[in-house]
Amino acid sequence: MSDVAVQPLSQLVLDMNESATIKMAQMARDLKSKGNDVIDLSLGEPDFDTPEHIKEAAKQALDAGFTKYTPVPGLVELRQAIVHKFKRDNGLDFAMNQIVVSNGAKQTIANLCLAILDEGDEAILFAPYWVSYAEIVRMCGGVPVEVGAGVEQDFKVTADQVAAAITDRTKVVLFSSPCNPTGSVYGKEELEAIAAVIAPHEQIVIISDEIYEYINFTGSHASIGAVESVKHRTVTVNGFAKGFAMTGWRLGYMGGPVYLAAACAKIQGQFTSGANAFSQKAAAYALEADLAPTWKMRDEFLRRRNIVVELVSQIPGFVVNNPAGAFYVFPDISYYFGKTDGNVTIRTADDFCEFLLLNAHVGTVGGDSFGAPDCFRISYAASEENLRKAIGRIAEAVGKLKTA
């Protein structure tokens, strides 16, 4: 008998890629646990605490006994607040039965892909894209179709590119604005142009991930769901993790067509049921309360962006845009491919990030998993002191890389 235990894993799991952001964060933690001074800029997590008034609302909900199961699509109180938020901030008109609250925006996107995609259906992803998009599409039997834009386009795809990618198998167009990982923001006219090329194709559902909506430095946020020609088949996804520094609260939500909301609630009812009760009470309060703490965080992120872009731009070989939202910079570092420090030769962005982690003790994420193999992501959700120190270390480390 073999000493090796049988491990009957599904092909789905065997084929699945591990989340690159989670993998790099764990590598950084492992290195730090060995006594190394590691600055981790890999995770997309605000370094601020949840605002006090939101925490207090959760405490009050706990004391009031909100510890039981919730309706699968969410508490009525929260869904009402979301309906109001969509109208107030986005010009979107939804009824209660068009809203579904989930355990994070990631679950919302998974619910939607499960509800829409059959085996072989295509999902157009604007690349660079968030690492989980492609894997979620594949898990649902779909085929990711990448439409890419580099730093020279401010990482924003054009309507013509989208039009060229549409086939009779296209069922989904999925993108984020403000974008993770690039921080790029699509303006109203850009979204209207994209909507115009999608509009004739009635089989396509647009999924607009707007989780970074409140971390937007342009002065205005545009939602493609407000475009008349596509609003009836656009799903707007949002949540509380980024704008309210509530990552661990695990709350996301969607507003979309009634049939899709019902389908997502049906799927969620079999997977997780309703989201956390007292978190939902606090979230409802957060949407209706003063947003001053959110704007204060946004302003601090803008200040950090300016510092980071200035410092990164000074590193030879780094090509960086000036991101208009979120809290990332996404430099093109293809200049370093083929270079070596004498021990390691950089072939890919993942190689580059591993080199930085081991030699500069700075955690970042390679662009391969974001659909942008020439780039890497730096999160500036960290203190100014750590950002300056980390970028100084990066500059010193890459200065040792020479042509092989």
Image (cartoon, helix red, strand yellow):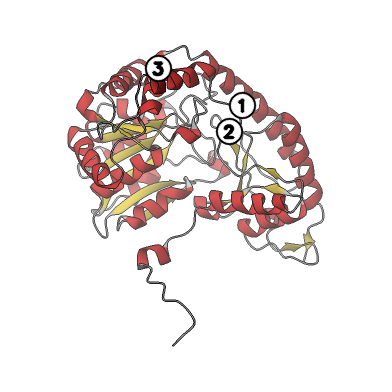
Q: Earlier in the sequence, mark 3 or mark 2?
A: 3
**Quadrant housing the N terminus:** bottom left
Q: Which of these two is toward me, 285 or 348?
A: 285
Q: Callout 1, which amino acid? A: Phe
Whole-percent x, y for residue 325 in the image: 54, 30
Q: Which of these two is toward me, 267 or 135?
A: 267
Q: Which mark is residue 285?
A: 3
Q: Identify the residue at image location x=42%, y=66%.
A: 14
Q: Which residue is mark 1?
A: 301
How far separated are the C-alphas under marks 2 and 1? 6 Å
Q: Which mark is residue 204?
A: none
- In which quadrant of the rendered view does residue 79 lie? top left
- In which quadrant of the rendered view does residue 77 lie? top left
SS for callout 1: helix
Cβ–Cβ below 8 Å for labels 2 and 1? Answer: yes
Whole-percent x, y for residue 336 in the image: 70, 56
Q: Earlier in the sequence, mark 2 or mark 1?
A: 1
Work out which residue is located at the far left of the displayed protein and give it: 259
Q: Which mark is residue 327?
A: 2
Q: Identify the residue at image location x=26%, y=22%.
A: 76
How far separated are the C-alphas under marks 3 and 1? 24 Å
Cβ–Cβ below 8 Å for labels 3 and 2? Answer: no
Whole-percent x, y for residue 107 in the image: 36, 42
In the picture shown, does residue 119 fall above or below 243? below
Q: Callout 2, which amino acid? A: Phe
Q: Is residue 235 rendered to the left or right of residue 308?
A: left
